Image (cartoon, rainbow, N blue to C red):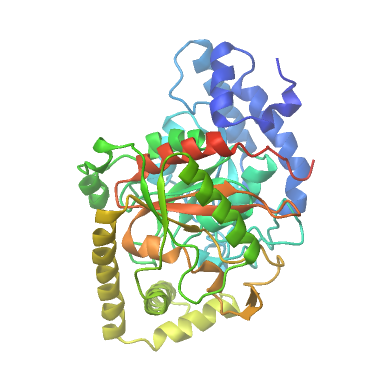
């Protein structure tokens, strides 16, 4: 029987096995992760709100179900965190902004309600940048989140608190959102598996207003693909309150899979720079996938990155402006970066927004044709290694100057098209800082991505190195 103070190191799958064997209880596990959180969180600032009394009540109920031989599911008793832009009943949900600093929702967002019904133990909320529109994690309410592998570095964003919590051992699973890479890039910076589900795969209701059109989805972050799969089996179901999820339920893409895949490998996007450490690490991962029998072919990006970047800026600034006007703050009560986005969005015209939507439709058509020739796309998840924690973005990548989205070039097209994607760890750099890559499949390919991810994971077998021991 393991020592109770080491239970925080276990994956969700391992915990469920131990619960079933009676080796320990959900109460034991919760107390272990609480001790770990109290030790680690002051240094990384990942978890910003907790309700440990409610968590203990949930763990006690779960322990009774396991004793009775009737657990609610594969995640019954497993502790997890939820990003601060996903409402959890009774816990403050700030979205990283003073606008919502006192908001305490009375209802769970649908995905949280489903996890709670399956017995998950909600430990706390994780930090995010204001209104989740930046690629690092800091805000005026809770402050800066740091990367557990190097406290001087950012864990990325906007799911920086979520990945920091999982990487540091606070919980084996985090629920987060991905609107333009906000799960995949931070997961790549912390050695984790991060799933961006197909648009509509995870039904949504009772959450914050959507400000990124249909681009943002809820997804899981974990240390293993098996744990990601367990979460998706619970939250990845249709619901009548989200019509898009009902449409996706009829998708038959997964029926003919898995098989050796045809993978289009995109080591770079046009002339945009990529850190050499990342390029080398992801190339090794491509070689490994090839050795597993997949047909991996290097190629050029089949769409206009600059045009899509402009469309993304239009959509995000317009959505943000709509939100702030809805709350009658006119750019007040928000940080300077958010106010600048608001002012820029206020100058946009309706035809510019419509043009952006037309470009999204064109992207979907381009990718539909591409997926006739390939099953998956592979690329780095991020173009830059993690940068200093207090800076919003890196200014230089591979000795070339870049703008605010230079580090994020690889991920946005996935959200714009609605495709499914998963980040998987590749070889870290010489200092042990994690690196990752993404596999992208067409809408409906979520299960295929988990299948290939598990195959890769079993061959790669990275050593589990706990930061901040």
Residue 333 lies, with reference to residue 2, above or below; the image says below
Residue drawn at point x = 68 percent, y = 32 percent: 8
Q: How many marks?
A: 0
Residue visible at 27% across and 64% down?
364
Name above or below for residue 151 compared with residue 11. below
Residue 197 placement (x, y as % from top left): 39, 49
Q: Residue at x 76, y 61 (%)?
A: 152
Image position, residue 236 (x, y; %): 35, 41
Is 87 left or right of 415, judged from the image as shown? right
Between 40 and 462, the one lying in front of the other is 462
Q: Is residue 36 above or below residue 201?
A: above
Residue 304 occupies which quadrant of the picture?
bottom left
Residue 420: x percent and y percent? 37, 51
Q: Position of residue 233 (x, y in %)?
A: 38, 34
Q: Quadrant of residue 70?
A: top left
Asked whether, in this view, residue 419 is left or right of residue 194, the answer is left
Front one among 38 and 21: 21
- Could you tell whether 322 is left or right of 175 in the image? left
Q: Quadrant of the C terminus?
A: top right
In this orientation, which residue lies closer to the viewer: 202 or 194? 194
Q: Residue at x 41, y 82 (%)?
A: 345
Q: Is residue 156 visible?
A: no
Would you say residue 83 is visible in this rendering? yes
| Quarter of the image where the N terminus is located | top right
In the rendered view, would you say 381 is above or below 328?
above
User: Could you tell whether 453 is left or right of 27 in the image?
Assistant: left
Can you name the residue that lies furthest to the bottom here?
A: 347
């Amino acid at each position: 029987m393991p020592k109770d103070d080491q239970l925080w190191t276990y994956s969700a799958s391992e915990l469920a096995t131990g619960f079933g064997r009676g080796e320990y209880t959900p109460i034991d596990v919760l107390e272990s992760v609480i001790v770990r959180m109290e030790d680690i969180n002051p240094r990384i600032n990942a978890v910003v709100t907790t309700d440990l009394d409610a968590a203990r009540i949930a763990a006690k109920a779960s322990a009774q179900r396991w004793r009775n031989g009737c657990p609610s599911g594969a995640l019954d008793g497993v502790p997890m965190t939820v990003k601060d832009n996903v409402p959890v009943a009774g816990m403050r949900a700030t979205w990283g902004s003073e606008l919502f600093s006192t908001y305490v929702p009375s209802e769970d967002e649908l995905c949280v309600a489903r996890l709670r019904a399956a017995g998950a133990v909600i430990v706390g909320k994780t930090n995010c940048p204001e209104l989740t529109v930046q690629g690092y994690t800091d805000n005026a309410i809770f402050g800066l989140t740091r990367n557990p592998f190097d406290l001087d570095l950012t864990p990325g964003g906007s799911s920086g608190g979520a990945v920091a919590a999982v990487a540091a051992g606070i919980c084996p699973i985090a629920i987060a959102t991905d609107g333009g890479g906000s799960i995949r890039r931070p997961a790549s910076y912390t050695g984790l598996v991060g799933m961006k589900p197909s648009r509509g795969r995870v039904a949504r209701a009772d959450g914050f207003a959507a400000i990124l059109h249909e681009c943002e989805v809820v997804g899981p972050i974990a240390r293993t693909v098996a744990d990601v799969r367990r979460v998706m089996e619970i939250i990845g179901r249709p619901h009548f309150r989200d019509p898009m999820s009902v449409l996706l339920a009829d998708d038959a893409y997964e029926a003919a899979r898995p098989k050796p895949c045809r993978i289009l490998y995109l080591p770079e996007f046009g002339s945009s720079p990529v850190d050499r450490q990342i390029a080398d690490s992801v190339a090794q991962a491509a070689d490994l996938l090839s050795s597993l029998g997949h047909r991996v072919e290097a190629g050029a990006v089949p769409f206009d990155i600059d045009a899509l970047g402009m469309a993304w800026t239009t959509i995000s600034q317009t959505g943000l402006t709509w939100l702030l006007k809805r709350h009658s703050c006119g750019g007040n009560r928000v940080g300077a970066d958010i106010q600048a986005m608001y002012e820029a969005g206020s100058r946009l015209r309706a035809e510019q927004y419509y043009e952006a939507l037309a470009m999204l439709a064109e992207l979907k058509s381009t990718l539909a044709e591409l997926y006739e020739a390939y099953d998956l796309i592979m690329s780095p998840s991020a173009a830059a290694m993690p940068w200093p924690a207090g800076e919003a973005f890196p200014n230089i990548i591979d000795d070339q100057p870049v703008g605010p989205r230079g580090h994020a070039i690889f991920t946005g097209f996935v959200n714009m098209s609605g495709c499914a994607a998963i980040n998987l760890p590749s070889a870290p750099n010489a200092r042990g800082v994690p690196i990752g890559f993404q596999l992208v499949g067409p809408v409906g390919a979520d299960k295929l991505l988990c299948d290939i991810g598990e195959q890769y994971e079993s061959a790669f077998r990275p050593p589990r190195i706990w930061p901040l021991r």
